[in-house]
Amino acid sequence: MSRRSRFVLWAAALTALHLCIANYFLSFTSVMSGTPLQGDDFDTHVAQTYAVIDGLQTAGKAWVYDVKLLAGQPEGTIFDADNKGWELWTYLLYRLGVAKGAAFNSYVLLSFLACPLAVFVAARLFAIGPLASLFAAFLGTLLWFFDSFVHWAWWVGMVAYASAGWFALLPLACFYRFAYARRRGEAFGYALATGVLLPLAHLNHPYSFFILAPPLGAVALARFSEMSRRDRLLVVGIVASTVLFNLSWLHAAALHWHYILDSAYFGKAGLDYLLADLFGVLLNPSNSGVIGTRASLRFLCFVPAVFALAVFRRERDPRFLVFAVSLGCMFGFSYLGAYIPQAGQLQPYRHVIPLAFLSALGAAAFAEHLARSGALKHLSLSARFFVLAYGLLVVQLVGRDVLYFVPSLVPPVEPLIDGKPSPISEFGFGRVHPMLAHLTYRLPRDPVFEAGSEEVRAWLGEHTAAGDRILVDHGPLGERLAWSSHLEVLGGFRERNILHSYANYFRAFPETASPERVETYLKTFAVQWVLLHDQRPDLERSPSLALVAELHGRRIYRNRRRMSKVLQGVGQVRARTNRIEVRASDPDRDLVVAYHFHEGLLCEPGCRVERQRVPIDRVGFIRVPAPHPRDLVLRNGYP
């Protein structure tokens, strides 16, 4: 069989394998059903994407004043900076006639399908041979599905950053080829490719900057003296194209930067996580995911990648610089981030994802070196037995990780001799709950993760009025109600990094608040309904709230009084994206409405907007000083 035929055969086998595994973890038919993927960060990104689509359709802007969440907040500005590519992709497909939910889901499908192809192309650009590049793509497939943090990232909804881990390889490889190109035309072609891919990488996820800036900067500095004036101008052009392509959302973020909050809540890992990942121990789910730690593949790629660095250095291979800087920086962010000042703002542990995919390239390069050097052919018999034993150990480690994610392949534990269920699960741990042994981290979610959510949403749809305010303690359900119901939600992702998030009672008051605080909050934010999953005695004891329903462990309370969003003056309020209408107000009295002030709001006709300071809110509400029209409109004028 010729080398070409062998390559085609292996490529076809890898493609078939990847498609089968992808369809297992992401049902292709469900993706195109029109219902967006839901749960955890998915609901946040659906809400963001749908709000941005609304803004693009109605105002031609990629951000809006969103009245559905947190008593009015600027959506599409800062908190969704990691979602811009997803939003644009969904909008473009939606304009082409694809159902909104299917368009949203197709981005996830694209991320699944393109992963091994991107790794293969990057490997070829880094001068790794065809078969070794296929091996790198195979490792990319295994990492995407069976490395616990990579898997957790896309399963929980951080698809953009999960895909950034492998997409960043493409502009990195193209810039490397540009910097070391010998022919003028070849250099221009790779510069052009970098000028396209680098802006797309940052549009997909802005933290691509921290993945790519160190190695790109190192290569540019190392080759600067060798570059012609034209090549230096091309470097400037690449940087300029990246900034200009992302200027729209950068401008929106800059306008709202004064609202930004601390983001250092997750992913602050130190050397203890290196040991934990090595031995498969879960330390803190807030850092490494609510999932069992399974990182064998990551280390099985990283170790030979380090060996590849030694080979590159010995042979004076120019790939040494780019791989040494990339692997070193990603390793440092991942496992030393807890010790780096301000690194917590980046959730540094998440850099294990690009570390893993970079390591796959290094592992493939080292495997190719071993094959070409013939080192394995000259091993003694005892050495070959050692390699065989090592290979069996690799199979054991990888196989154990695979079985964790495909628990249906594991036979159920038989009952004890007295017929009672085994207290030990199939994976050798104490069985805390009957469902826990066979959780499947697939998309759409296993129904066990979403138990009761749709019933609660349906009940609220039947018993609430359009525009009612509801306080929700469960973040993902709050986000879902914001994008899928007629309610205005006080809740959602609690650690939202903008000041408006303190309109969420559970962020403003993480501990039990006084009765006076509770009543002030309910009145100030015009809370008509409260939905609780966890115990909050301060709210449950409130004389203003009456328990009206209990569904699947969630308790629904209704305010005994009909709440008005007009806090000062009189009037009737109706709101939608970018627009708040007030009818039948008293023109001679100042008007204060329970929506957050924003610098871009205009009052029409012939009135103005001021900020009303509110003791329990950090942003302030909207004030329209008298005299003003009886009927008026507050709209986003886009500063």
Image (spheres, rainbow, N blue to C red):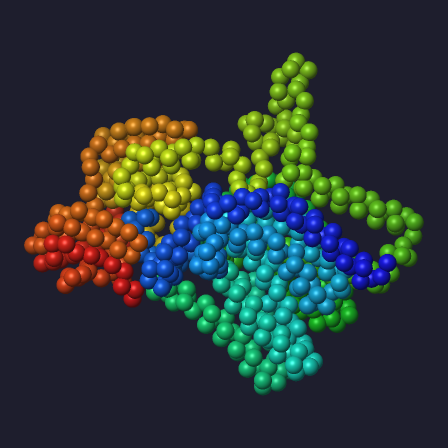
| Residue found at x 69% / y 56% | 137
State left or right for residue 385 relative to residue 619.
Answer: right
Which quadrant is the C terminus positioned in?
bottom left
Which quadrant is the N terminus positioned in?
bottom right
| Residue found at x 58% / y 46% | 28
State left or right for residue 395 relative to residue 504.
Answer: right
Q: Is residue 363 at all visible to an observer of this figure?
A: no
The answer to which of 473 and 157 lies nearer the viewer is: 157
Percent x, y for residue 365? 74, 62
* Depicted 359 relative to depicted 237: above or below: above
Considering every residue shown, the one lying at the far bottom of the view is: 229
Percent x, y for residue 229? 58, 86
Percent x, y for residue 281? 61, 41
* Depicted 180 relative to depicted 356: above or below: below
| Residue found at x 53% / y 52% | 106
Q: Quadrant of residue 510?
A: top left
Q: Is residue 185 at all visible to an observer of this figure?
A: yes
Percent x, y for residue 385? 87, 46
Considering every residue shown, the one lying at the far top of the view is: 418
State left or right for residue 325 relative to residue 460.
Answer: right
Q: Quadrant of residue 538?
A: top left
| Residue found at x 9% / y 51% | 586
- How many numbered marks appear? 0
The answer to which of 601 and 514 lies nearer the viewer is: 601
